[in-house]
Amino acid sequence: MAGVWFDEMHVGQTFEHPIRRTVSETDNVLFTAMTHNPALLHLDEEYMKGTEFGARIVNSAFTLGLMVGISVGDTTLGTAVANLGWDEVRFPKPLFHGDTVNVVTEVIELRESRSRPEAGIVTFLHRAYNQHGDLVASCKRSGLQRKRPQA
């Protein structure tokens, strides 16, 4: 079990996730096609040459999923009951093919569950950065997290 139990977390706890991921053209095109997203932003290189970005940008839903996915091993793997929601999802800068993403997660809120004494609710703030240190995505994620089992 790699995740952290609810009762072992504290507000302000930060995880600098060791996993980094270089995003490929295949990642972007496959995810975009699988989700039936026809946006030219992700699929049409010639169109994008004439935009402020100059090249296709990575699908933001992929960026969100990657950011949260990178965090799982250090935070919730084996200790989560359920994901409860994502709030304040932001993409301040685009992600491009070939960019390498690294993620930092902070515990920003903890509260006991009123209906489940064996669990609590944790709110994480996830931040994703590219290889230049630019913030490319952030979100708050709430989840129901198990407490350490009583022996």
Image: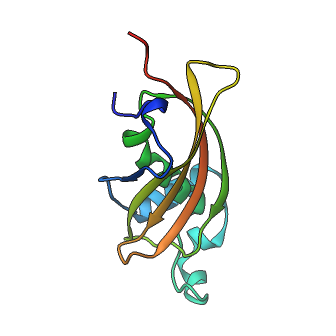
Q: Is residue 52 left or right of residue 11?
A: right
Q: Nearer the viewer, residue 59 or 34?
A: 59
Quadrant of the image occupied by residue 27: bottom left
In this view, which residue lies farthest toward the top?
151
Residue 76 visible in the picture: yes
Q: Residue at x 51, y 60 (%)?
A: 29
Q: How many marks?
A: 0
Q: Residue at x 61, y 42 (%)?
A: 142
Q: Is residue 47 left or right of residue 18?
A: right
Q: Nearer the viewer, residue 29 or 108?
A: 108
Q: Residue at x 53, y 72 (%)?
A: 57
Q: Is residue 72 left or right of residue 34?
A: left
Above or below 37: residue 122: above
Give the colour scheme of this rendering.
Answer: rainbow
- Please provide percent x and percent y for residue 98: 37, 71
Quadrant of the image occupied by residue 73: top left
Above or below 139: residue 123: above
Q: Where does the C terminus fall, quadrant-wise? A: top left
Above or below 90: residue 141: above
Q: Where does the N terminus fall, quadrant-wise? A: top left
Q: Residue at x 41, y 58 (%)?
A: 103
- Please provide percent x and percent y for residue 20: 33, 58
- Please provide percent x and percent y for residue 112: 62, 30
Residue 58 visible in the picture: no
- Please provide percent x and percent y for residue 56: 53, 75
